[in-house]
Amino acid sequence: MSDTKYAAEFGDAAPGEESAGGSGIAKGVTGYLIGLALAVALTAASFWSASTHLIYGPAVPFALATFAIAQMGVHLVFFLHITTGPDNTNNVLALAFGVLIVFLVVAGSLWIMSHLNDTMMPMNEMMARQR
């Protein structure tokens, strides 16, 4: 018995998996509503953690990073339907390639700006030479 057939028959599937059986549209809408509720709850928790004094001050950035990572996970599972199933191999590879490209663009931009900052003449010397 294949994994997806087993998941559809016994309800053992990841939250974002489309072939989990059920009543079609109602099952899909329920998944989206659960994802929406989790995303709203994580957003509210982020705003709360940034404005409360119950969390130790230097730990607030770590709390915000934790909520951000959790919200990325919710979006990947409930909205983009990225799961561990064998049908999602291409989606995971496309996502990994996109992350790689973004990393290369950001890292390359920071490298170029750092190099320019090291090699450019300071502004006060540049203004003194123009006089």
Image (cartoon, grey):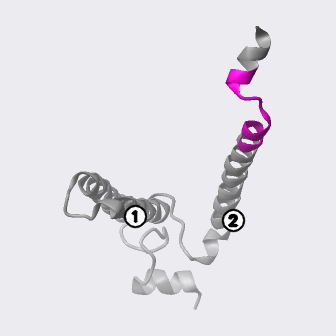
Q: Is residue 110 above or below residue 67?
A: above
Quarter of the image with the C terminus in it: top right
Q: Nearer the viewer, residue 116 or 16?
A: 116
Q: Position of residue 120 (x, y in %)?
A: 77, 32
Q: Looking at the magenta stretch, what is its main secondary structure?
A: helix
The residue indicated by pointer 1 is 62
Secondary structure beneath disc 2?
A: helix
Mark 2–mark 1 distance (CA, rounded to whole Å): 28 Å
**Residue visible at 54% across and 66% down in the picture:** 82
Q: Secondary structure at mark 1?
A: helix
Residue beneath disc 2: 93
Numbered tag placed on residue 10 in the rendering: none
Magenta-tinted stretch: 114-125
Is residue 13 magenta-colored?
no
Q: Quadrant of residue 54?
A: bottom left
Mark 2 vs 1, N-terminal side: 1
Task: Give the residue at the far bottom of this rendering.
Answer: 1
Residue for point 31% across, 56% down: 46
The answer to whether residue 29 is visible is no
Q: Relative to 2, is 92 above or below? A: above
Q: Is residue 115 inside the magenta stretch? A: yes
Residue under the point 69% across and 24% down: 123
Vertical side of 19 occupied by 39: above or below? above
What's the residue type where badge 1 is placed?
Phe
Q: Residue at x 53, y 72 (%)?
A: 83
